[in-house]
Image: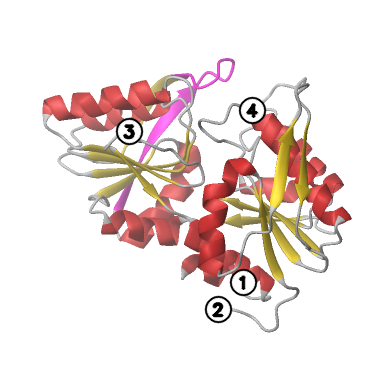
Amino acid sequence: MTGRTPRAPLAIVTCEASRALAERVADSLGVPIVPSKETWFACGEGKIEIEGNVRGSDLYIFQAPIAPGDARSTYDRFMMTLHAVEAARLADASYVTAVLPYYPGARQDKRKGRTREGISAGLFARFLEAAGAHRVVSVEIHNEAISGMFNPSRCRMENIFLHKMYSHWIADQGLAGDIVAAPDVGGLERARYYAEDLNLGLAVISKERDYRTPNRVLTSTLIGDVKDMDVLLVDDIIDTAGSVVAAVTELRDNGARNVTVACAHPVFSGPAWDRLTGLAEKAEQEGWRFRVVGTTSIEHTDAPDWYLACDIAELLGRVIRSINSRGSVTYAQEH
C-alpha cells in the first residue's frame, strides 16, 4: 500500500560492489541509476563522485559490505558508503538513505561478557549518522536491538523482514518440508515466523558455545521430533558453515530425511564452500536431498546446483517506493 504524494523525486546511486542488485531494484521501480564514478587510489584511499544532479531528491545509495570476488575488504566498502553518503549530502539531496542489505558488524552487537572490546554495530551506526545518512535500510538484521543504536533524530534504521516473501518462495521451490528447525535457541523466534507462515511444526537445536573461539560449538541437543521428516533449517547468516554442518548432522542423526538450509545472508567465507559441498556429496552418496537457499543480499555467481538464490530486488523496490510515498513499509514487505 503506497501513501500520498512522494516526499521528493526518487533517485538511486550505487557503489560498484552492489551494482547488479541496484540495477534490478531500479528496473523494478522504473527509475534510472544516477551515474557515479568510484575511484581507488594506489595508496588505498577511495572516493566516489556523483555525476548526475540529485539536488532535492530522495536518494537511495546501494552498497554490498560483503561482496564475493571483490578484492576490497568489508571495511573498504563501508568507507566507500560513507563517501557516497557525504557526497550526496554535499550535492544537496533532500533525503539520503543507505541501503545495506547486510549490515556490517551486526554480529558485534554486544560484549558477551568481555569488557575490553568495542561494539562495532553501534560504531558503524555513528559513522553513518556522522556522514549524513537520514535512514539505513537493511535486511533481516542479526539483532533488532541494533535499530536502537541509531539516534532517530538524526538517522533511522529500517529493518526489512524477509519471512513472508521468503517462506512462500521456498514453498514454491518445493523445499518447505514437514517441519521448521532453528539451529540454536537465539534463532527460535525467526524459525517460528517461518513455521507459522508455512503452517508447520517447530524444532530447535540447543547449543553450548565457546565464545573464546569464533564459530566454535561445544555440544548440541535437538528439542523436537524430526524422525522421517523433511526439515527446513532456518538461520539468518551462514558464515563458515561449521554450525550448519553440525546442525544438519544432528538432524540426520535424529532421523530427519531430507534437509534444506535457508539463510538470509549467505556470507560463505573461509571453508564454507568446501564444507557445504562435502555435505552435498555425502547426501548424494547416502540417497537423501540437501539444499541450501540464500538471498541476493550477498550475490554468488557460478554457484553449484545444491545452492539456490532468492532475489530480493523486488522486495527492496517495494520498500523504497513505500518510503518515498510515505506508505507502510510493513505492508510492502508482506505483500
The magenta region covers: 201-217
State yes or no: residue 82 in magenta.
no
Separation of marks 2 and 4 at Cα, in angstroms = 38 Å
Callout 2: SS: loop
N-term mark: 2 or 4: 2
N-term mark: 1 or 3: 3
Residue type, label 2: Met
| Colour setup of the view | secondary structure
Q: Does residue 167 sit above or below 306 in this rendering?
A: below
Residue type, label 4: Ser
Residue type, label 1: Ser
**Between tags 4 and 1, which lies in front?**
4
Residue type, label 3: Leu
Q: Are marks 1 and 2 in contact (CB under 8 Å)?
A: yes
Q: Which percent across, then down, holds residue 279?
A: 27, 26
Query: Residue under circle 2?
Result: 1
Q: Residue at x 55, y 15 (%)?
A: 213
Q: Are marks 2 and 4 in contact (CB under 8 Å)?
A: no
Query: Residue under circle 3?
Result: 222
Q: Residue at x 71, y 50 (%)?
A: 36
Q: Does residue 22 sit above or below 42 in this rendering?
A: below
Q: Residue at x 59, y 79 (%)?
A: 2
